[in-house]
Amino acid sequence: MTPPGPVHHLPAPRIARTVLITALLGCALLTATGILTAGGSPAAEATGLVLLPALLTLYLLHCTPSGNRASLKHRCLTLAVQALLTYLPFVIFDVLWETMAGYLAASLLLLLPRRAAWPLYAAVGLSVLVPALLQGRDLLHSVHLAHTTLLTGLVLYGLARLTGLITHLHTTRGELARQAVTGERLRFARDLHDLLGFSLSAITLKSELVHQLIATQPARAMKEIDEVLAIAGQSLTDVRKAASGYRTLSLQQEIKAAQSMLHAAGIRVRTEGELGTLSPHLDTALATTLREAVTNLLRHSNAAYCRISAAQHDGVVRLLVENDGVDHAYHNPAPHSGNGLGNLRTRMTAIGGRLESGTGKDGTFRLVAEAPVRKPTETSAEPRDIMVPRNGSAA
């Protein structure tokens, strides 16, 4: 998945800005045409043609995100300048300048809080009535001028807001795409850690055992070699499934694999289990937890005994792994070590469960994972990976 490019180069935001600028230029062109055809003096015409770009620039400044983020004092200052450039030319151009009052009305809606913006917006519309009534125009024509001013301001305000919302929408879409890419990378990294950590430890352990047995017990050595090949083949299959996102594991199978691994390492194992049929997401999460616990036990402890218990009670599945071989002096200097428990906590949290680990007063290290049999109907998005320091045999 590739995130979208810069927002300003995307079609929708570009079209929205084009429509807004076209509307602004159209209003300004109407005003300029009225001034040039009114038969005024060259000085008056020149003044109008100079003020029009200034007002257009001010409004465009108010439409930008930086204009909205400016301090209230700065916004009030630019609005005051715009108000002066809007009302003073009425002395020269009279009602020909009423479109520019629409620019001011839109700026008020964009920059000020609602409680102040809407009354001032209405006041701008009513202010256009003054020159018309002073000229002796009829009330209906004067109301038409006020209505046109208010409508112009509302249209320009709507176009500016729509442009901002479209730009924000595409910015958010790009950010969501980047988060999705990051999440997928973290998922794949967690799966590789959980899969290969166990498999490589098993291959290493059994290869060392084969090296010791090949001279004295060749038949058993051949059996262990067959298991090494089977583990290597299964590892390749698991990695391919992890890459495609369809990897599932079985807790029952992992308990059997853990027994074989620990027996090969000379560790006494006791297993207890009363499990029914588990859903794939729960089975995979608990199997992964057991893999990591056994991997850490083999790598970072000097255990002589291990107990694995898995039971289902009152709609909750509980996995317990404990051993008597905590190595308090162990420290992994690798810069990227310590992801194991963080990965497991992430997985358990994603299915509404929890994971706890620690060393008891008797020196026994315990890891407990619990999760509901039924996955909650509403689960939060999978959190990012958590870097957790290794403690004892739970690296």
Image (cartoon, rainbow, N blue to C red):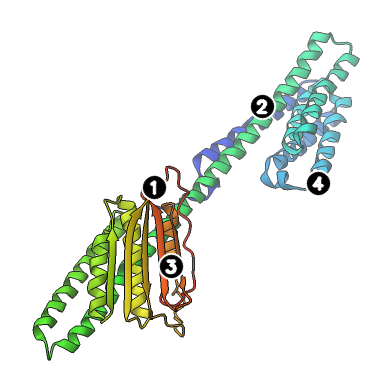
Q: Residues within 10 Å of mark 4 (few under 14, many from 20)?
A: few
Q: Amino acid at mark 3?
A: Leu
The span from disc 4 to disc 3 (Cα, nearest Å) is 51 Å
The residue at 44%/81% (across/down) is 332
Question: Does the image show residue 13?
Answer: yes
Query: Residue reaching furthest left?
Result: 219
**Circle number at residue 341:** 3
Q: Secondary structure at mark 3?
A: helix
Q: Residues within 10 Å of mark 2 (few under 14, many from 20)?
A: some
Q: Amino acid at mark 2?
A: Val
Sequence order check: which comes first, mark 3 or mark 1?
A: 3
Q: Would you name the residue on which mark 4 appears? A: 74
Q: Would you name the residue on which mark 1 appears? A: 375
Sequence order check: which comes first, mark 2 or mark 1?
A: 2
The residue at 74%/33% (across/down) is 109
The span from disc 2 to disc 4 (Cα, nearest Å) is 25 Å
* 339 with respect to 139 (left or right): left
Q: Residue 39 location, x and y as percent?
A: 81, 21
Q: Amino acid at mark 1?
A: Lys
Image quarter hosting the C terminus: bottom left
The span from disc 2 to disc 1 (Cα, nearest Å) is 49 Å
